[in-house]
Amino acid sequence: MAKNKTTETNESIVDFINAFVEDEAKRNDAFKLIQIIQEITGLEPKMWGPSIIGFGNYHYKYASGHEGDAPLVGFSPRKAAISLYIYVSPENREELISKLGKHKASKGCIYIKKLADIDIEVLKNMISLSLEYLKNLYPSN
């Protein structure tokens, strides 16, 4: 089985943001997101792989046998958009995401251009629900 490439590292988050996030507004949003997520989770941010800032972790195992570790909540301030890794239960996802504001979404990610485009209170609610959902889905963590 292939080893998961996205693992927790000891790289500096501040150095990553300052070196690789060229846009000043996106840098500021990245630091603000760290504050928001830390406030809600009580967890310290860690780098996951070369470009994901994650908080906490859980161990997953799929029916296919694939397993690994992932952050409970995370984001990546990429050039095109900020990718948010928030896992809300399917029954709550559509309602919450419809209230979030300007975004794009895929199965596992929510993409935003800037924090000013979204409702921060809805984001905070989604982060809290994501923690609860993952802790219930993977209780051994």
Image (cartoon, rainbow, N blue to C red):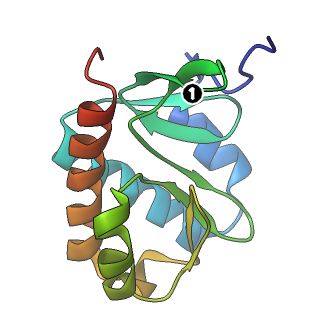
Q: Nearest the camera: 30 or 37? A: 37
Q: Nearest the camera: 12 or 60? A: 60
Count of marks, rendered view:
1
Mark 1 residue element: loop
Which quadrant would residue 131 be assigned to in this image?
top left
Residue shown at the point (52%, 40%) measured from the top left = 53
Up-down relation of residue 117 to residue 86 (above or below) = below
Please indicate whether residue 18 sits to the left or right of residue 110 in the image: right
Please indicate whether residue 133 sits to the left or right of residue 109 in the image: left
Q: Amino acid at mark 1?
A: Tyr
Q: Where the C terminus falls, by quadrant?
A: top left
Up-down relation of residue 138 to residue 100 (above or below) = above
Give the labeled residue for mark 1: 62
| Furthest residue in direction right, as rendered | 2
Report whether residue 117 is seen: yes
Residue shown at the point (72%, 49%) measured from the top left = 20
Residue shown at the point (28%, 55%) measured from the top left = 127
Measured as percent of width and height from the top left, residue 27 is found at 55, 60
Measured as percent of width and height from the top left, residue 104 is found at 59, 79
Q: Where the N terminus falls, by quadrant?
A: top right
Up-down relation of residue 44 to residue 14 (above or below) = above
Q: Nearest the camera: 141 or 7? A: 141
Measured as percent of width and height from the top left, residue 50 is found at 71, 33
Q: Nearest the camera: 88 or 31? A: 88
Residue shown at the point (70%, 45%) measured from the top left = 19
Please indicate whether residue 109 sits to the left or right of residue 128 in the image: right
Q: Residues within 10 Å of mark 1 (few under 14, many from 20)?
A: few
Measured as percent of width and height from the top left, residue 75 is found at 52, 50
